[in-house]
Image (cartoon, helix red, strand yellow):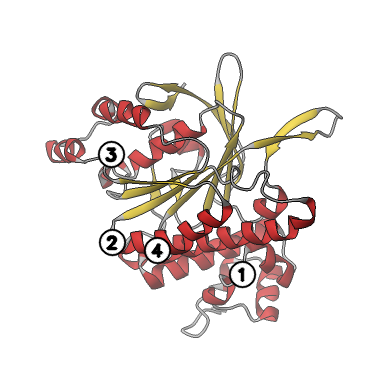
């Protein structure tokens, strides 16, 4: 039986029977009604697993995106990371509509990854770019201008086009000017940037990528133990509005997270992403970087688009590349 119609745009046939029943019982047949909540809030309302909730949100986000602005673009458009091995790991590249988190210890390559994506989003469509700009929000250090210029100077060696027209377009892009840079120091400034500055910028500039490097910095040390509920609300507010922007404007959203030490199952210690479950439940795809003396790795912790696995990579003058 086909349960989708004009009045209920969510196609229940793509979900398992338990999820279908939960959505019908809760009256959640419209994508707009689902996206009023965060994933964590919605999961509690309908009593679904984290994985099932994420599948519902991805479906709802894709529908809303097509109804607003993404009808002009492929809903399932993927953005290249500039590294074929990492693209394959992610199921083709970075997917729209949702938050992709990249975490890892200091010096493992998180900012290098973000800088490269800020360039690949500007690439021509035949190179799996989006021919668009990026908004880069720095909360820790100054934007690494010298490093991005080094990567820009190597673009002609890193990317190859099949025809001269695309190659000419590749050389004519003003990569530096297409990155809108903001420096943020507090949670309130970050909220103001996301709620006020970014929506205005999206109306006047062809931006398709938002990077926050990092989401962790403004939330560490700003709250006392008694203020942890407010911290969770602020995290939810920021994540919810990022989801909203990604759906309405067809954006890729990347948030850098730091790591903290935690007890492992065997009694030892392991590194896990910071900000706890209140943030983890708001993330669509979680990636984690790590490093050893001889190599660096990027791992998919969870994603609705691909299985959990990891691959090695290296950082060169050109950027992030296959090992």
Circle number at residue 204: 2
Question: Judging from the image, what secondary structure is the residue with disc 2 in?
Answer: helix
Residue 104 x %, y %: 60, 33
- What residue do we see at 46% from left, 84% from top? 6
Going from N to C along the chain, the mark reached first, 1 or 4, is 1
Residue 174 x %, y %: 22, 41
Q: CA distance from mark 2 to mark 1?
A: 28 Å
Going from N to C along the chain, the mark reached first, 2 or 1, is 1
Q: CA distance from mark 2 to mark 4?
A: 9 Å
Where's the N terminus, which quadrant? bottom right
Q: CA distance from mark 3 to mark 4?
A: 21 Å
Q: Are marks 2 and 3 in contact (CB under 8 Å)?
A: no
Q: How crowded is the residue under tag 1: few (<14 C-alpha within 10 Å), some, or many (20+)?
A: some
- What residue do we see at 43% from left, 63% from top? 196
| Closer mark to the observer between disc 1 and disc 3 | 3
Question: Judging from the image, what secondary structure is the residue with disc 4 in?
Answer: helix
Question: Judging from the image, what secondary structure is the residue with disc 1 in?
Answer: loop
Circle number at residue 176: 3
Q: Are marks 1 and 4 in contact (CB under 8 Å)?
A: no
Q: How crowded is the residue under tag 4: few (<14 C-alpha within 10 Å), some, or many (20+)?
A: few
Circle number at residue 37: 1
Going from N to C along the chain, the mark reached first, 2 or 4, is 4
**In this view of the protein, which residue sits in the foreground, 52 or 230?**
230
- What residue do we see at 68% from left, 62% from top? 40
Q: CA distance from mark 1 to mark 3?
A: 36 Å
Going from N to C along the chain, the mark reached first, 2 or 3, is 3
| Closer mark to the observer between disc 2 and disc 1 | 2
Q: CA distance from mark 1 to mark 4?
A: 20 Å
Q: Are marks 2 and 1 in contact (CB under 8 Å)?
A: no
């Amino acid at each position: 039986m086909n349960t989708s119609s004009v009045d209920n745009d969510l196609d229940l046939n793509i979900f398992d029977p338990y999820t279908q029943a939960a959505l019908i019982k809760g009256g959640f047949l419209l994508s707009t009604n689902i996206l009023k909540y965060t994933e964590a809030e919605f999961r509690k309302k309908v009593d679904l697993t984290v994985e099932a909730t994420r599948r519902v949100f991805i479906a709802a986000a894709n529908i809303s995106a097509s109804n607003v602005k993404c009808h002009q673009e492929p809903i399932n458009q993927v953005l290249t990371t500039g590294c074929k091995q990492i693209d394959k790991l992610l199921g083709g590249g970075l997917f729209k509509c949702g938050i992709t988190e990249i975490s890892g210890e200091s010096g493992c390559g998180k900012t290098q990854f973000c800088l490269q994506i800020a360039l690949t989003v500007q690439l021509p469509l035949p190179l799996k770019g989006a021919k668009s700009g990026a908004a880069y929000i720095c909360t820790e250090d100054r934007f690494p201008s010298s490093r991005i210029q080094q990567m820009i100077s190597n673009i002609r060696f890193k990317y190859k086009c099949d025809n001269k027209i695309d190659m000419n377009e590749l050389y004519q892009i003003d990569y530096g000017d297409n990155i809108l840079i903001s420096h943020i120091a507090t949670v309130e400034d970050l909220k103001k940037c996301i709620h006020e500055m970014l929506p205005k910028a999206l109306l006047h500039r062809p931006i398709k990528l938002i990077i926050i490097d990092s989401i962790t910095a403004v939330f560490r040390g700003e709250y006392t133990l008694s203020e942890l509920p407010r911290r969770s609300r602020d995290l939810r507010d920021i994540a919810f509005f990022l989801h909203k922007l990604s759906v309405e404007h067809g954006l890729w959203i990347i948030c850098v997270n730091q790591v903290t030490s935690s007890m492992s199952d065997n009694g030892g210690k392991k590194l896990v992403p910071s900000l706890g479950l209140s943030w983890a439940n708001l993330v669509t795809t979680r990636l984690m970087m790590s490093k050893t003396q001889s190599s660096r790795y990027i791992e998919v912790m969870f994603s609705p688009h691909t299985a959990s696995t990891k691959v090695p990579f290296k950082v060169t003058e050109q950027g992030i590349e296959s090992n």
